[in-house]
Amino acid sequence: MTATVDPPVRQTARFVVTLDRDDTAAPEAALGSGTGRRTAEDAASTKEGPPGQDQFTAETERFRRELLAHCYRMVGSAHDAEDLVQETYLRAWRAYAGFEGRASIRSWLYTIATNVCLTALKPRPIRVLPSGLTGPHDGPDRPPSPVAPGEVSWLEPLPDAWIAPPVDDPATVVVERESLRLALIAGLQHLPARQRAILILREVLAFSAAETAEILGTTTAAVKSGLQRARARLGELEPEPAELLEPTDRRARALLDGYIAAFERSDVRLLEQVLRMDATLEATPFRDWRSGRAKCIHLLDAYVLGTPGDWRMIATTANGHPSAVVYHRDADGTLRADGLVVLVLTATGIARVIKFHDPALVTTFGFPDALAR
């Protein structure tokens, strides 16, 4: 078994506000309004007296993790999602004095977060994986060549530790993982932004059609129509979901260990044992990707594996998938951060390998940017 180094648990920074002249301005009326009434949970956390920072934190902070997951589903970038959640809390604080409690604090925050995301998405290209650009490479053998910087906006993985439910609820954990799988997130990015929001609010977060209409400032008829179109489009983009192994499954850990060992030992035979016949291999920032075990292994053996000891991987999880942060040995012998590999695992083997060539992801996932020799 490959040893696992546990990264430090990442704590999302608590939102702290200090009153200044801007914060005492009139609240944003549109964000402070709502229909319905506060839930019992909301009322229990509300203190008497004028709203202040402590009361605001007590009422809103418990929703931070799920808002981060929501923003990530919308924009496909962990770092952008963090910025958008921060913007959500800033707007919520400024509008808090005008919040009348006619809607739950949760739906009020989702109204703000969703509209923050929709505004942010207007000028941005969608984020994709290589398989979202073109079909698998079927031409002459050639080494992978990167796409020019800025030509494509790539999907980013999300550390599971960022959004792990704080309670020990296995059912909640599984549902959260399912709604953050890379295939789903990649498919969502191809939907028009408002359809994307409708599908997430209705199918993932279980808001009613009326609640979703209020959040988006539209009609229930428009929500129902948008949901139908989104479902149809997503069905075209996302293949039938396979029965995936959970990261806690022993079989999943055995496959992850096998993949790690194959790289660290430069062992092609081990790759043959863990990859499915129909496995796919893709990596950012490369446009070409491979389909079929033989083609995947040939690419890795010819251009990637190198010699034993060139690579070091440490197990982690991303988007509900077993994953590993990746280090590569440089000319002076130091193992330096190289990126992250995400494995889509089934009972019959590794179905999909997605490598993100971004050294910054190693520290994002809580690991050092270099290892001792």
Image (cartoon, grey):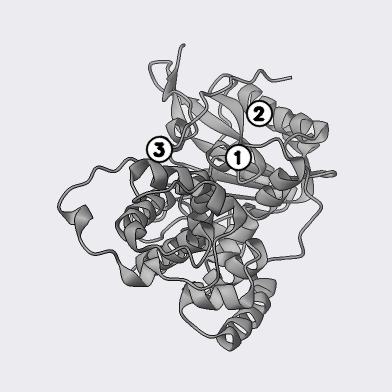
Q: Nearer the viewer, residue 366 or 334?
A: 366
Judged from the image, the secondary structure of the residue bearing numbered disc 2 is helix
Q: Is residue 260 visible?
A: yes
Q: Earlier in the sequence, mark 2 or mark 1?
A: 1
The image quarter in which residue 15 lies: top left
| Image coords of residue 152 (percent x, y) | 41, 60
| Image coords of residue 225 (percent x, y) | 61, 86
Determine which of the numbered discs, if any, sits on residue 260 in the image.
2
Residue holding disc 1: 164
Residue holding disc 3: 14
Q: Earlier in the sequence, mark 3 or mark 1?
A: 3
Q: Residues within 10 Å of mark 1 (few under 14, many from 20)?
A: some
Judged from the image, the secondary structure of the residue bearing numbered disc 1 is loop
The amino acid pointed to by label 2 is: Ile
Most extreme residue toward the right is 348
Q: Nearer the viewer, residue 168 or 119?
A: 168
> Residue at (40%, 36%) from the top-left corner?
13
Q: CA distance from mark 2 to mark 3?
A: 35 Å
The image quarter in which residue 18 lies: top left
Q: Residues within 10 Å of mark 2 (few under 14, many from 20)?
A: many
Q: Earlier in the sequence, mark 2 or mark 3?
A: 3
Q: CA distance from mark 2 to mark 1?
A: 24 Å
Q: Nearer the viewer, residue 172 or 252?
A: 172
Q: Nearer the viewer, mark 3 or mark 1?
A: 3
The image quarter in which residue 159 lies: top right
Judged from the image, the secondary structure of the residue bearing numbered disc 3 is loop
The amino acid pointed to by label 3 is: Arg
| Image coords of residue 163 (percent x, y) | 56, 43
The quarter of the image holding the N terminus is top right
Most extreme residue toward the top is 373
